[in-house]
Image (spheres, rainbow, N blue to C red):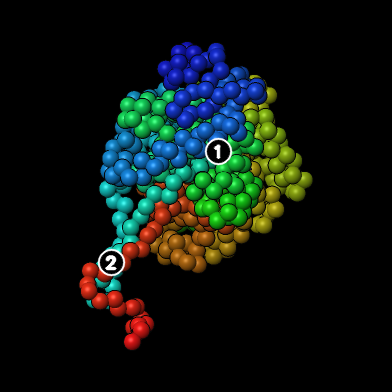
Amino acid sequence: MHDLPALLRRLGIDPDGVNPGLYVGSFSSASPKPPLASFAPRDGAPIASVSRATREDYERAVRSGEAAFREWRSVPAPVRGELVRQLGDELRRVKDDLGALVSLECGKILTEGRGEVQEMIDIADFACGLSRQLYGLSMHSERPQHRMFEQWHPLGTVGCITAFNFPVAVWAWNAFIAAVCGDVTLWKPSEKTPLCAVAVNRIVDRVLERNGRRGIMNCVIGDVPDVGEPMLDDPRIALVSATGSTRMGRIVGPRVAARFGRSLLELGGNNAIIVMDDADLSLALSAVLFGAVGTAGQRCTTTRRLFLHPAIAKRFTESLVAAYAKVRIGDPLDDATLCGPLIDADAVAGFRRALDEIRRQGGEVLCGGRVLDRPGFYVEPTIVRAPLGFAPSREEVFAPILYVFETATLDDAIRAQNDVPQGLSSAVFTDSVRRAETFLSPAGSDCGIANVNIGTSGAEIGGAFGGEKETGGGRESGSDAWKQYMRRQTCTVNWGTALPLAQGVSFRVE
Ligand code: NAD
């Protein structure tokens, strides 16, 4: 990055001072705590810092949202969509800069950083169109001169907790859909990627200001006890949409449920690809490589397990090991790099611990397995051959570790694939229609995402995204995921002169 300060300034970030950690339409927070420093995973160097929003800031942000909601809920949905369209336009203008900041702060390679901003733009377009399609059904009433239908109303404030590995797109998935639904959002970004949140809020602030709509998208950047946990117990937060680890979801889900709030959980994955003997192996190889090594194994949809038919297992594994040898590990901002760093020293320690355990339990490391001795948080993409049911493969380690297994039949492979606590993404590679449909049938993959001849990661925004079991059950983004951001109301209108009761019940005084 030749001129980092200039990039930061173009995105509204002060490289030298302390950037605000509170976005409720005015930037001031009197946090007594030391500012939150952001570090670049590529070399561990500090980038800039952000003041930590306090518990009082949280309160201000919630109240600001509540006040804005009272008006926003009655603005016609297509007008709300127009505001989201403008946000999409602003994002188009800053795509390269914001994409570079995403790479710098979370460590994904530049093409993926820009891709993440493109995902924001795509969801803005989708949400804008959706604003004219928040359809309810109409039903035929059993009673004469009665009309029955359902309609969808805004919920109120949506709390949006996001993970470090998609520091901008996941917010957009939530905030843009919520906005056209008439909700306001309160964003608590990951403390590991605060600058991405600052840059996004600078853009949001400009657009909201221009439209006289401050307060509909707020943000608090700070510590979990001050700005994260309060959302869980706060009845003013109608929906908590939380993306992150299953460990976090285990806390968030029950706490929100205890107050009868709604939660939308997007948690950890343990995704698998099955490669059959009739598959196009070059297609499968590219998919496994991107799925397992892309984003340095730090996607919820990262390919972590590979089930190979015995007839192609040896050949495929050799080709994969050869491909791994060609993967350039290094600075995510360098165009030649395919595998950037992990997010921080804790993630490297997690990789080390996992490898120790794999070796202790007899897993065979076919390639990789080392932490690189250089500034930043680099590890080698790793392939491990293991027997079916290998205990370490049941856990999600957020690093590029791929387990390879042999499974004799498709049924065996599906059974083994499903035999983990998580249920996010899955794929089969086969040229057989029968095998593909078996994989997609009710007796097939138990995951929220099931693909044929494409890998586990890199979902489009048009579908509903999410997974089953310990992945949390939530669905975000496309299809009818918007319904989670609204409340359904069933209405019956009697336009006659009598009052017939349903089910023929008679109830009158003589
Ligand atoms: P994390 O669980 O450590 O943190 C996620 C967010 O939750 C952060 O903003 C964090 O501050 C917040 N948080 C943690 N504890 C909280 C609490 N008690 N109350 C309120 N907020 C709390 O996850 P991470 O390391 O940032 O991200 C990696 C994980 O996220 C992986 O498990 C990955 O699979 C998952 N993920 C899932 C999806 C999905 O859509 N399913 C997408 C991206 C990441």
Asked where in the image residue 143 lies, by quadrant, the reply is bottom left
Q: Residue at x 56, y 31 (%)?
A: 57
Label 1 crowd bin: few (<14), some (14–19), many (20+), radius 10 Å: many
389 vs 112: above or below: below
| 22 relative to 498 in the view: left or right | right
Q: Secondary structure at mark 1?
A: loop
Q: Earlier in the sequence, mark 2 or mark 1?
A: 1
Q: What x and y, as percent, mark residue 93? A: 34, 25
Mark 1 sits near ligand 1, with its Cβ under 8 Å away:
yes
Q: Residue 163's mark?
A: 1
Asked whether the residues under the numbered discs 2 and 1 touch, taking CB atoms below 8 Å apart as contact, a structural biologist would say no
Q: Which residue is situated farthest in the front direction here?
A: 510
Quadrant into which the C terminus falls:
bottom left
Which residue is found at the position 23% from the left and 69% from the top? 495
Visible in this render: residue 470? no
Instruction: Please state the horizontal and vertical placement of residue 133, each as a whole percent of the image.
Output: 29, 51
Q: Position of residue 318 (x, y in %)?
A: 57, 43
* Residue type of the residue flagged with mark 2: Val
* Amino acid type of the residue tagged 1 in the rendering: Ala
Where on the picture, by quarter, is residue 84?
top left
Q: Residue at x 44, y 28 (%)?
A: 25
Q: Give percent across and percent down for residue 186.
A: 49, 38
Evaluate whether residue 388 shows in this view. yes
Q: Is residue 370 left or right of residue 296?
A: right
In the displayed structure, does residue 415 sit left or right of residue 3? right
The mark found on residue 354 in the picture is: none
Say if 183 sits above or below 93 in the image. Answer: below
Tell me if the residue at label 2 has its CB under 8 Å from ligand 1. Answer: no
Residue with the mark numbered 2: 493
